[in-house]
């Protein structure tokens, strides 16, 4: 054997030395080698390829630096780079000795022949491929994935979703983080399959291996027959049952079961999803159940049996097999097992963990061994085996060493020359094998290992990796590996200072490497003390800097380079337990809040610095002093390690305050304003301390707070301020009157609070409820349900932060410190007038401050006292009142609204005397009243003002506190939230009451109307005094009254009587009633009929609003039997007639007698609408109902009954019946035709009696609405419901005016409009009603009606419907009372084989009356056409019987690309449905949706009687909801139109993939059947489509349009000229054909051929016109003379000039169609004609014509056979190959790619682009768009600058509608380097696309891109 070179050994040993953990890049000693280059350290492949830190952006490294970093990365991730040997001879020898496959690391399988390989198979990152099955051991269990240790030191990842089979129904996303850890365990052996590889570094071949544990993938191909007893299978626990576990193998064909008594190996219960192994004990093949045993010994000893014919798919990693040695290799063995398979064992998987150099002696040839499958590759059939003793026992080798461990006396077992050392590490309890790679032996280059190291000698080794599956440690002997404090991630501790080298700098930070090779991240904020814009300039790659470790999480290390942190000498805070009180350390700010800062320390420890400890001056903003990321020195004030809370302070040495300076919480202090800031006011307290008053704490009223702040100036003194809290040395103060006034009652601790007490406070937070703050930090919580009485309001809209509130304590929990409160106004209403008192006091202060600034005098206010009389002059009269001026005060004005004038007529300049009601000092406005009751109360007094004040004081003497008084509303100040009242009983004294309260400031206020004479009840709470600013303060009962026991007793004592007049407040407005409250706790309602007098008005409540006060009269007590009677006690009325004081009121209050008569007109309001009735309320006691069919006769209105009759709508009707017992009326909307005598009433509504006066409701000729109840079979007609229990019948002849299918469009439940024909009573007490749905009133419609036998005369043309068919003939219905018979001999001119089929029941026929017997009422009709003068034919072809809007049925005659020709049933008329009228949506391919012969329904849109043209529509919108539209079948129809030449109706495929129908010269003559009814009739009988075959003159068809060749791609200029000449000739030919066709059509229009003689005349004038010949053939076929039609075809072929190839071809095509329809047999006849046509015409055109016929008639088998022949015969024709592709796509068959490959090989190269682009368009249209994209991408890779291809590609994507995909394609297109003139169309298309689907931002983006492109290519400087 040749001696192995060191390089070879290096390579081979390296393939198997991949450690499981990251190797460390060891820094080299700075010693120069001989060549002066520092040596590069080689490291092993790491097991975990998951990047520790994110990547992104482009690198800023130079090429040399990139190479250096790549070399280092290669060393870290396992690229064993060997230095080349300087000896070229050795190098050459190595190349000879090592084959290429060894170098690439490729795997070899069992098909070994010839020379055996030298090395064993080993999997590496280079040869791992998807589908490979590998055995592994679980190394780590994370929250979202599993880390699997694989053979060769590789590491794979298993996502949580790939750890289980889908049939287990385990939701991995919703599972908790411990789910994987509960299901799997570290060290568990698992079989995996490789799913995918993510390349981290494609150049170096490093991959992230994604694995799956799904058994459905591992056991793919397993069947129940392949499973034998004794096999070992892996299964999931699917469910746990009483007697065992149901197991899943991932396959649906069988399941497993594990009995519970057979769990000898398991001590714990299993969980669902757990993976386990078991031995097959028995198989129940009938029930498909496999019974397993999970005994560990049995599983570990079970050997796979040698089954004959076993497949490699049945081999699973971990399977134990018996094997024999075939040969030994240089680094392992090659074994044979299971007869057919061979596998290899590498040296690290031998039985002995410490193989010496003589290991080969233990494995002789044919030695039998037991092995387990380690991995297998199905693609190469390579199998790897292991003989490891631990793995043979089905257990993972133990991990007895840890990374970083140092062993001083490790024994060298084997020296591999040029590769490394095998070492025995003395671990406990057994030794562990370790391998040291040659690159890790010494810091310098190691040479000649066998001389440096001797087997058996001891060395010092350090572990830096471990391969869990082999149980092999990876060691290092370098001296540098033992130096330094950091070797692995576990050695790194938070807070330690380290040196590191910068590897890379990116936008997220820098990647650094510690001296031991461990990598860390320095985030961008930690790269410097300050923010740096360009980190790459500050940090140079390769530089060594000093860092401090911030934290270590798993293997991710974060460091900082902040200078303050790195050089800090203070203690490091890395855990909450180290945070002792008084500890001073460094940290950095991570977040700044309004109330403080968050500071972060090492290892994720975080603390909080309250605002009081920030050291800020009062009013200073935190963000102006500190910033995020700033390093700060802080002191620990307190900590709770269990709660992970630390309180900090920036005040390192806090100042101690003197006793005089200490201010206690809750005390009242005075302060002087020092500064006014945007956040509040800073005041100086006690000359030393400073405090802050926030803006919200300046006033109880939100609006006044901002006014007060704007008026404050430095130096202003607050007499009373309440200390709420302290923030360090700063005091938190409040000036709220409510808090200052109740300072003694405010609690500071929870023990001071008692339940159910009312406590004043303020809102401090509104998250998830209301938080109410008291003194200090004492806070109560109010849930949302306890915040507002009306739960419909939102809490955030009802309160604001800083709002003063009154809170009721609901619960106090001393243990948790929680206080629950309520803020509901019903329980927290004010009991005093402090709220309005604080308003007036603060208003006075603000006014004084403003006057002080403006230096105005306050003397004027003394002369305008409240209630005093002043004299002034009318200054101006306005719409809403008068303005009064005063002589002494020019800047003071008075205002008196109209309702305060007291009826006085005032004019400008008039001097008046008025009483002061209110004074606004801020606005210098006085509210006045000129009412006599105010002015005349001082009539005995003089004008001396002191005397008036005396009289005023005398009046006030009569008032007492807490006295309840009645007050009149004078003025409502909605903006100021109070109103001015007068007390008539106390000499009209003026008082003030608040409209709102503390807790309801933002809620809707109670509505009071200015000028309304409203009396309210109030309590006097404060008499005029300086503390009230001279005002009388009142408390309204509705605001301040709380529900007490005394008030409840007062409620019971008080009461009202029927007839009483009350003042009530609206609480709710409903559609049918008003809810009101009045008195004390009384509720009532106003029924909608009690709102107005006389006729009912629409929405009588529209002018009312909630809170408005009304005068109402009590008319009755609530009915206790009513549904909601508890919500109101009284029935009220606001009708004007009920509010008068006349004596008639008592009469009106007496119950009204139920006195109604039939026919009477009544009005009611809708209160309910159900499926059949509209329910009305006529009054509070009387109801009415309207049957839904009586509401209208229009179907649309009946369909939308709910919309027609909304709740509350006023409806007037006429009484049809009366039920006195139920007090119920039945109404109809139309007046009754007859009214019974007297006041007859119908009180019984049972079905046995006559149906509710039917004769008075309907009569003959009336129009009613109905609903179809039943569609009767045959010609029975319809049964229509027209009333409750009342039905009418619609005869078959009365359904429509002579439609072929009268029942078309009618269905059960449909609403219809009916005309009453006859109403007659029956003998059984019921009524029979005949109805009609025919409303035609034109002459034709009236003429068609034959109601009486006297109307019939012989030879009269009549229409009828077949009623029944007998062997002797049939009977037809002419009308609902008249039938006729038709004898068998009169059914047709010809022989009828089956009358039942030709004349089905219901068919419309047109005939002639033969005889009429009036007495016997017998009528006989004939249908023979020859028996008359042609009137019957004219009738069948008469378009005058058709009306626009009629719905017809018919069959598709012909399918064209521009529409459908439809033959109308029972006529010979043919109409055209244009493609635009087919569907409401766009129709891409009409041929694929419709086919000839289909039955369809359509609506007549237009009838041209002169030109005999009918336009039809099939859109769903034409039919509405009442017509059921028959959807055309989705069968494949002919696509031959796409084959036509451009000049002959070709469907040109444009760039958008749409069919272009602009070139259709044949469209006129193709519609000849519409213009000539005879031709339509014959063509209908013949059913031949003679002109529907695609014809081509040249092969260049739609492709020339789809793929436009640009000038730059034209080969020669002469080629362009030839093409243009051909196109010109083709255009000239097309124009000539158009002229010929037009001439023929004009000729035929003048004289319509009606016989053979006439056709002969036309032919003699147009011998070469194929159109005339084919029409002649069709005419003969209509006469059933097929032989004559053949003779005409033969004659035409002989007659037409031989030069007219196209005309001859047209006849051949028609001949083919004829034989296809009438040939015997058709196939042979068609083939004969086809063979003849080939001799005279272009073979390709004939083939295409035949193909089109086969496809149109759906003879797919014949079409496919023909296509196969055509692709061989015309293999150079692009058109033929496209027809092949199109056929496959139409039939939804696979194989398109194979056809494309064949076509590309067959077609000339210049046709490739045309063919591939057209194929791609077809794929986009009717195939798979992804395949179309692949075709486009392929040709664009070859021709990237073909803008025509880009345009086609873009058009297909735009049509498909994927906006993101289209934009990406546009971006690719505009990134091309093209000339501006070529790029301009692409940019324009992009702009149009964004204008269609994008927004303004996208449009501007495209415009900007276009400008940039123009600048780049032309250097144009655009102007803005």
Image: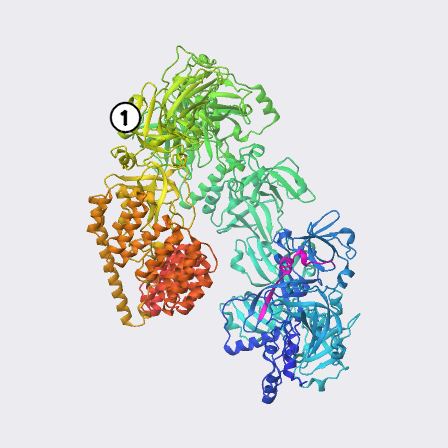
Q: Quadrant of residue 1545?
A: bottom left
Residue count near mark 1 (Cα–Cα under 10 Å), binned few <14, some 14–19, many ≥20: few
Q: At x 56% / y 75%, what residue is drawn? A: 70
Q: Nearer the viewer, residue 1629 or 1734?
A: 1734
Q: Is residue 460 above or below residue 1509?
A: below
1461 displayed left or right of 1187: left
Q: How many marks?
A: 1
Secondary element under disc 1, as helix, strand or loop, is loop
1667 displayed left or right of 316: left
Does residue 1495 appear in the picture of this structure? yes
Q: Is residue 1158 above or below residue 576?
A: above
- Quadrant where the image shows the N terminus: bottom right
Q: Nearer the viewer, residue 1074 or 1336?
A: 1336
- Quadrant where the image shows the C terminus: bottom left
Percent across and percent down for residue 1726 are: 37, 54
Q: Quadrant of residue 786?
A: top right
* Residue numbers of the magenta segment: 206-229
1909 displayed left or right of 288: left
Q: Nearer the viewer, residue 921 or 1267?
A: 1267
Please say whether residue 225 is one of the residues in the magenta stretch.
yes
Percent across and percent down for residue 909 are: 29, 30
Q: Nearer the viewer, residue 1421 or 747?
A: 1421
Percent across and percent down for residue 1877 are: 31, 66
Q: At x 45% / y 47%, what residue is drawn? A: 710
Please say whether residue 639 is one of the residues in the magenta stretch.
no
Does residue 1333 appear in the picture of this structure? no
Q: Give the residue number, with chain letter if any, for mark 1.
A: 1354
Percent across and percent down for residue 624 are: 51, 58
Q: Residue furthest top?
A: 1238
Q: At x 42% / y 43%, what residue is drawn? A: 1527
1715 displayed left or right of 97: left
Q: At x 26% / y 50%, what residue is drawn? A: 1669
């Amino acid at each position: 054997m040749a001696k192995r070179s060191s390089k070879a050994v290096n390579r081979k040993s390296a393939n198997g030395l991949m450690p499981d953990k990251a190797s460390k890049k060891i820094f080299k000693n700075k010693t120069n080698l001989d060549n002066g280059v520092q040596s590069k350290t080689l490291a092993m492949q790491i097991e975990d390829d998951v990047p520790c830190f994110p990547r992104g952006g482009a690198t800023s490294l130079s090429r040399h630096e990139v190479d250096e970093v790549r070399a280092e990365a290669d060393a870290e991730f396992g690229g064993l780079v060997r230095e080349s040997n300087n000896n070229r001879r050795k190098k050459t020898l190595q190349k000879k000795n090592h084959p290429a496959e060894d170098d690439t690391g490729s795997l070899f399988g069992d098909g070994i022949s010839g020379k055996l390989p030298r090395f064993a198979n080993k999997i590496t990152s280079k040869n791992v491929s998807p589908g490979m099955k590998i055995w592994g051991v679980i190394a780590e269990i994370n929250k979202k994935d599993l880390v699997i240790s694989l053979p060769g030191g590789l590491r794979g990842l298993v996502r949580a979703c790939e750890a289980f089979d889908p049939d287990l129904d385990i939701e991995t996303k919703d599972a908790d983080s411990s789910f994987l850890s509960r299901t799997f365990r570290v060290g568990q052996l698992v079989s995996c399959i490789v799913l995918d590889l993510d390349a981290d570094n494609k150049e170096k071949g490093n991959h992230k291996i994604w694995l799956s544990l799904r058994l459905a993938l591992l056991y793919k191909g397993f069947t129940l027959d392949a499973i034998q007893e004794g096999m070992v299978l892996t299964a999931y626990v699917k469910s746990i049952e009483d007697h065992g576990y149901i197991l899943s193998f991932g396959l649906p064909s069988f399941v497993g079961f594990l009995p519970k008594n057979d769990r000898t190996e398991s001590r714990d219960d299993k969980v669902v999803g757990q993976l386990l192994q078991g031995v097959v004990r028995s198989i129940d093949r009938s029930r498909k159940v496999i019974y397993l045993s999970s005994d560990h010994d049995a599983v570990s000893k079970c050997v796979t049996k040698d089954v004959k014919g076993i497949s490699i798919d049945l081999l699973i990693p971990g399977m134990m097999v018996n094997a024999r040695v075939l040969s030994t290799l240089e680094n392992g063995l090659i074994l044979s097992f299971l007869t057919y398979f061979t596998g290899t064992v590498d040296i690290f998987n031998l039985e002995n963990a410490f193989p010496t150099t003589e290991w080969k002696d233990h494995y002789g040839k044919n030695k039998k061994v037991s092995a387990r499958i380690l991995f297998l590759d199905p693609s190469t059939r390579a199998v790897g085996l292991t003989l490891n003793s631990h793995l043979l026992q089905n257990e993972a080798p133990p991990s007895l060493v840890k990374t970083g461990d140092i062993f001083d006396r490790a024994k060298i077992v084997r020296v591999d020359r040029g590769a490394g050392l095998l070492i025995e590490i003395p671990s406990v309890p057994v030794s562990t094998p370790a391998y040291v790679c040659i690159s890790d032996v010494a810091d310098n280059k190691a040479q000649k290992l066998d001389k440096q190291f001797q087997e058996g000698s001891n060395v010092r080794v350090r572990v830096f990796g471990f391969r869990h599956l082999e149980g092999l440690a990876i060691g290092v002997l370098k001296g540098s590996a033992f130096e330094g404090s950091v070797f692995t991630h576990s050695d790194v501790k938070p807070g330690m200072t380290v040196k590191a080298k910068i590897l890379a700098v990116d936008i997220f930070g820098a990647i650094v490497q510690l001296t031991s090779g461990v990598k860390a991240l320095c985030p961008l904020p930690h790269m410097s003390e300050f923010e740096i814009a360009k980190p790459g300039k500050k940090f140079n790659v390769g530089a060594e800097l000093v860092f401090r470790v911030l934290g270590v999480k798993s293997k991710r290390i974060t460091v900082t380079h902040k200078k303050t942190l790195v050089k800090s000498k203070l203690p490091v805070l890395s855990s909450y337990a180290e945070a002792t009180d008084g500890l001073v350390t460094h940290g950095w700010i991570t977040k700044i809040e309004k109330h403080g800062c968050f500071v972060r320390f090492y290892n994720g420890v975080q603390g909080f610095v309250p605002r009081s400890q920030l050291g800020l001056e009062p009013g200073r903003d935190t963000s102006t002093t500190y910033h995020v990321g700033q390093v700060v020195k802080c002191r620990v004030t307190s900590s709770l390690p269990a709660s992970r809370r630390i309180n900090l302070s920036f005040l390192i040495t806090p100042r101690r305050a003197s006793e005089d300076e200490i201010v206690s919480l809750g005390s009242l202090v005075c302060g002087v304003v020092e500064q006014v800031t945007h956040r509040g006011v800073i005041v100086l307290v006690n000359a030393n301390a400073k405090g802050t008053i926030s803006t919200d704490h300046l006033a109880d009223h939100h609006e006044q707070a901002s006014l007060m702040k704007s008026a404050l100036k430095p130096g202003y003194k607050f007499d009373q301020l309440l200390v709420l809290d302290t923030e360090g040395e700063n005091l938190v103060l409040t000036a709220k009157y409510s808090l200052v006034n109740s300072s003694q009652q405010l609690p500071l601790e929870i023990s001071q609070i008692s339940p159910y007490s009312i406590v004043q406070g303020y809102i401090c937070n509104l998250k998830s409820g209301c938080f109410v703050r008291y003194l200090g930090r004492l806070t109560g919580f109010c849930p949302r349900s306890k915040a507002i009485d009306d739960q419909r309001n939102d809490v955030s809209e009802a309160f604001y932060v800083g709002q003063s509130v009154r809170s009721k304590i609901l619960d106090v929990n001393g243990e948790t410190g929680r206080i629950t409160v309520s803020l509901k106004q019903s329980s927290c209403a004010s009991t005093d007038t402090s709220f309005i008192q604080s308003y007036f006091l603060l208003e006075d202060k603000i006014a004084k401050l403003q006057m002080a600034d403006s230096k105005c005098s306050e003397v004027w206010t003394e002369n305008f006292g409240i209630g005093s009389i002043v004299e002034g002059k009318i200054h101006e009269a306005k719409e809403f009142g008068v303005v009064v001026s005063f002589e002494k005060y020019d800047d003071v004005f008075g205002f008196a609204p109209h309702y305060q004038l007291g009826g006085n007529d005032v004019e400008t300049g008039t001097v008046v005397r008025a009483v002061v009601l209110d004074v606004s000092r801020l606005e210098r406005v006085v509210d006045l009243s000129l009412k006599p009751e105010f002015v005349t109360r001082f009539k005995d007094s003089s004008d001396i003002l002191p005397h008036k004040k005396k009289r005023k004081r005398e009046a006030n003497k009569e008032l007492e506190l807490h006295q309840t008084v009645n007050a009149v509303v004078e003025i409502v100040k909605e903006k100021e939230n109070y109103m001015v009242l007068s007390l008539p009983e106390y000499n009209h004294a003026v008082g003030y009451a608040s409209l709102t309260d503390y807790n309801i400031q933002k809620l809707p206020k109670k509505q009071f109307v200015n000028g309304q004479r409203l009396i309210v009840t109030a309590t006097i709470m404060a008499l005029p005094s300086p503390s009230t600013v001279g005002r009388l303060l009142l408390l309204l009962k509705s605001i301040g009254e709380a529900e007490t026991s005394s008030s409840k007793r007062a409620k019971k004592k008080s009461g009202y009587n029927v007839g009483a007049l009350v003042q009530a407040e609206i609480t709710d407005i409903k559609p049918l009633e008003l809810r009101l409250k009045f008195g004390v706790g009384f509720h009532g309602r106003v029924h909608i009929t009690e709102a107005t007098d006389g006729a009912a008005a629409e929405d009588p409540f529209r002018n009312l609003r909630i809170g408005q006060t009304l005068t109402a009269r009590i008319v009755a007590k609530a009915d206790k039997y009513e549904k909601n009677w508890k919500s109101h006690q009284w029935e009220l009325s606001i009708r004007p007639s009920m509010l008068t004081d006349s004596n008639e009121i008592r009469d009106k209050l007496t119950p009204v007698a139920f006195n109604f008569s039939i026919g009477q007109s009544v009005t009611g309001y809708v209160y309910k609408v159900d499926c059949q009735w509209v329910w009305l309320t006529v009054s509070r006691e009387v109801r009415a109902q309207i049957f839904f069919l009586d509401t209208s006769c229009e179907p649309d209105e009946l369909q939308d009954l709910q919309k027609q009759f909304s709740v509350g709508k006023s409806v007037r009707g006429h009484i049809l019946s009366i039920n006195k017992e139920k007090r119920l009326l039945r109404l109809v909307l139309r007046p009754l035709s007859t009214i019974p005598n007297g006041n007859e009433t119908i009180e019984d509504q049972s079905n046995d009696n006559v149906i509710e006066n039917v004769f008075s409701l309907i009569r003959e000729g009336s129009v009613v609405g109905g609903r179809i109840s039943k569609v009767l079979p045959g010609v029975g007609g319809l049964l229509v419901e027209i009333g409750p229990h009342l039905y009418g019948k619609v005869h078959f002849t009365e359904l429509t005016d002579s439609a072929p299918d009268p029942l078309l469009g009618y269905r059960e439940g449909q609403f219809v409009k009916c005309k009453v024909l006859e109403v007659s009573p029956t003998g059984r007490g019921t009524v029979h009603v005949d109805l009609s749905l025919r409303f035609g009133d034109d002459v034709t419609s009236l003429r068609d009606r034959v109601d009486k036998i006297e109307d019939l005369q012989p030879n009269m043309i009549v229409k009828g419907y077949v009623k029944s068919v007998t062997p002797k003939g049939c009977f037809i219905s002419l009308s609902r009372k008249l039938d006729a018979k038709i004898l068998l001999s009169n059914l047709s001119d010809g022989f009828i084989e089956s009358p039942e089929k030709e004349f089905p029941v219901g068919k419309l026929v047109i005939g002639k009356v033969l005889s009429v017997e009036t007495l016997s009422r017998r009528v006989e009709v004939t249908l023979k056409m020859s028996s008359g003068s042609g009137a019957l034919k004219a009738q069948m072809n008469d378009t005058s019987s058709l009306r626009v809007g009629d719905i017809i049925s018919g069959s598709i005659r012909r399918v064209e690309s521009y529409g459908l020709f439809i033959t109308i049933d029972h006529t010979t008329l043919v109409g055209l449905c244009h493609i635009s009228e087919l569907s409401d949506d766009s129709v891409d391919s009409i041929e694929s949706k419709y086919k000839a012969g289909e039955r369809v329904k359509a609506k007549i849109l237009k009838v041209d009687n002169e030109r005999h043209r009918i336009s039809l529509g099939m859109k769903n919108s034409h039919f509405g909801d009442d017509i059921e539209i028959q959807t055309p079948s989705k069968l494949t129809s002919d696509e031959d139109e796409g084959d036509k030449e451009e000049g002959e109706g070709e469907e040109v495929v444009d760039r958008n993939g749409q069919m272009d129908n602009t070139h259709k010269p044949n469209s006129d003559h193709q519609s000849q059947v519409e213009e000539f009814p005879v031709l339509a009739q014959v063509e209908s009988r013949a059913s031949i489509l003679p002109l529907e075959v695609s014809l081509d003159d040249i092969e260049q068809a739609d492709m020339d349009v789809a793929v436009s060749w640009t000038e730059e791609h034209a080969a020669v200029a002469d080629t362009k000229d030839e093409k243009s000449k051909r196109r010109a000739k083709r255009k000239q030919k097309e124009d000539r054909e158009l002229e010929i066709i037009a001439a023929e059509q004009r000729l035929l229009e003048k004289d319509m051929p009606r016989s053979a003689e006439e056709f002969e005349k036309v032919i003699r004038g147009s011998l070469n016109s194929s159109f005339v010949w084919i029409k002649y053939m069709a005419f003969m076929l209509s006469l059933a003379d097929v032989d004559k039609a053949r003779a005409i075809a033969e004659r035409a072929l002989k007659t037409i000039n031989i030069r007219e190839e196209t005309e001859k071809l047209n006849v051949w095509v028609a001949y083919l169609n004829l034989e296809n329809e009438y040939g015997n047999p058709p196939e042979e006849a068609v083939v004969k004609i086809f063979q003849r046509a080939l001799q005279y015409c272009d073979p390709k055109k004939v083939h295409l014509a035949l193909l089109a016929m086969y496809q149109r008639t759906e003879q797919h088998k014949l079409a496919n056979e023909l296509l196969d022949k055509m692709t061989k015969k015309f293999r150079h024709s692009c058109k033929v190959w496209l027809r092949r592709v199109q056929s496959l796509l139409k039939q939804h068959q696979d194989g398109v790619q194979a056809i494309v490959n064949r076509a590309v090989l067959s077609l000339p190269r210049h046709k490739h682009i045309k063919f591939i682009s057209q194929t791609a368009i077809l794929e986009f249209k009717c195939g798979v768009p992804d395949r179309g994209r692949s075709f486009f991408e392929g040709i664009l890779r070859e021709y990237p600058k073909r803008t025509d291809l880009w345009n086609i590609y873009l058009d297909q994507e735009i049509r498909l509608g994927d906006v993101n995909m289209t934009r990406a394609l546009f971006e690719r297109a505009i990134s091309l380097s093209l000339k501006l003139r070529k790029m301009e169309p692409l940019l324009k298309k992009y702009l149009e696309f964004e204008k269609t689907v994008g927004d303004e931002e996208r449009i501007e983006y495209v415009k900007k891109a276009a400008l940039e492109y123009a600048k780049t290519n032309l250097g144009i400087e655009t102007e803005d």
